[in-house]
Amino acid sequence: MAIVKMNKISLIGLESEKERILENLMKLGVVEITDSKEKMASDDWKELVDVDGDNERVSRLDTQIDRVSAIIDYLDKFDKRKKPLFSAKRNISVSDLNMVLQNQDKLWAVINEINQYDEILSNLKAEKNKNSNLILSLKPWEALDIPLELTSTASSTVLIGVVPEMADTDKIEQALNDTVPESYCEVLGKDKEQSYLLIVYLTSKEEDTMNVLKQYGFSKVNFKDLSGTAKHNINQASKNIEKIDKDIEDIENKMASYVKYKDDLEVLHDHLSIERERKIVLVNLIKTNKVFMLEGWLPENSAEQVKTFLEKSSDCFIEIIKPAEDEEFPVLLANKAIPSSVESITNMYSVPNSKELDPNAIMAPFFILFFGLMLSDGGYGAIMAILSGIILKMFKLEEGTKKFMRLMFYCGISTMLWGLLFGGWFGIPNIPALWFNPSEDPELLLSYSLLFGAIHIYVGLGVRGANLIKDKKYLDAVFDVLFWYILFTGFILFVLPYIPKVDAESVTGLVTLGKYLMLIGGVLLILTQGRENKNIIAKLFGGVASLYDLVSFMSDVLSYSRLLALGLATSVIASIINQMATMFGFNNILKIIAVVAILAFGHLFNFAINALGAYVHSCRLQYIEFFGKFYKGGGTAFEPFKAKTKYINLK
């Protein structure tokens, strides 16, 4: 199927040629190098070999990569070049790479200079914050026209401070006047939290003055390091900020001039990443003084070509081995357009294991059809298909983004088809439906939703049977699939009269057949589902307990009623939006603008929320109702040793 068959590869080469062999393996990009250190646990090996690798070198490369990455991110905010809607890696040749690397010393100098400027910039911003905070702290005292350092004269004390906003400043002035006539109180200002006071009194009357002020929650304020009036200090701080802003602007202009090095820094970053991959893979190798050994996996159809190429390009011994029948191997999928578009959805659940069928080819049609049915508006589907088609055609996309856009294109086409069948186009009424209008006959759509669910679950059971047959468990396929088919089919026939839009009298014969099939299926399952237990009582009890899965089957089928619910939600909301818009009428230009705005925003919102709902609920139907019938997962994705880059594709 779509899971590529793998072979093991074992390679023994000369230590002197290790770098060339690893470079060739990286260029080929089809071999996953696995850990060979387990061989050292064997008595035959542990005295002969050592673990390869240089952790210090890897650590240094990590540090360098982090430094370069930080500078690239830093320069990004100064990069005013027009960025594409969908970014893709740049293609560069080996000669272009070598030209950049020849200028590597200059790039490291640029990195150091940017770091120095960044440190200066941080200091300037800290100084600006300091001055800004000073202005904020002095602003309430701007009316104070005496120097801040003046706290006393030969016979008097000058005091500034605050009281809570709730304190009555008139009463404070009156209390001071009554208790300490030799005093002066001035309210300099107020805000939502407190009042700002200037108090001058004879030093000899300090105790009496403080007793009055304490009654009103007075707090003293000091500006020890400042001289001159508050207004003078505010003006000076403002001038400092103006100068700092100019210095910051000058430095940012200098920083912006380094944007011309950004592309080369991206190349340097990916070169270091490639070098790190080369070094980090060494820890999986074992070696002696003269030779080294590596093991790994590669696709079966590439094995002989890789073996021939490596043996011709270097002195090494290579052995290709087929995996044992029960041995797990890394999973590489080789799907075509439609199945590959849903791989990310399957991988969010789990990567398939190497011993089961790849579910993507089977799941893809159901996901796409269910998505379209839940969105169900042909106008929305057309927009989705057109936009995703333009993006696929006009933009150079990364592989993951390309697959997602391809899925959206297929889902858009599916939505258009359901829109044609149901007559749903932007909620516009009275458009003829090729099949029927769900808003007028929701019971019919419910019946078909349950039918689609039963088909989906039956296919899941069929895949379980195929996996069992693939593993040569033929009796298990009969007991665990065929017998359940009999019971479930009997149950469906038995409940036909209770399904909407089904004529109970016309299905009487099928109901009778359903009773017999349920009886036969139930007996067969009771006799076989507890077969793994040891004694006869436990076997029968296990068989009886298994019949509870009939309730799970009914619950699973009912879950597909969400196809009806979401499909109706889209059309109903769209029609309500249209009605709200037309209520304004078209009498004048303002009303026309309002109608257009409501239609545009309303349909955009309806499309976004219901497309998201269709995606999420279609995933749920796959993960729970479908995968639950057969899918084991738990596989490990195939990760070949190759150049892993972030910004460039090296040609």
Image (cartoon, helix red, strand yellow):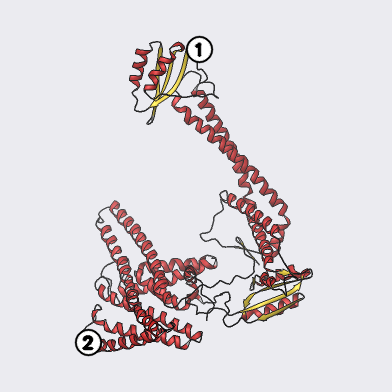
Q: Indicate the quadrant where residue 54 lies.
A: bottom right
Residue at 46% in and 67% down? 388
Task: Classify residue 570 as left or right of residue 413.
Answer: left
Indicate the quadrant containing the C terminus: top left, top right, bottom left or bottom right. Answer: bottom right
Q: Which residue is mark 2?
A: 506
Residue at 31% in and 56% down? 598
Where residue 549 sits: x, y (%)? 35, 78
Q: Indicate the quadrant where residue 379 lies.
A: bottom left
Where residue 311 sits: x, y (%)? 74, 78
Q: Is residue 205 above or below residue 21?
A: above
Task: Classify residue 569 as left or right of residue 332.
Answer: left
Q: Secondary structure at mark 2?
A: helix
Mark closer to the chain start, 2 or 1: 1
**Label drawn at residue 520:** none
The amino acid pointed to by label 2 is: Ser
**Label drawn at residue 153:** 1
Where residue 158 sits: x, y (%)? 47, 16
The amino acid pointed to by label 1 is: Thr
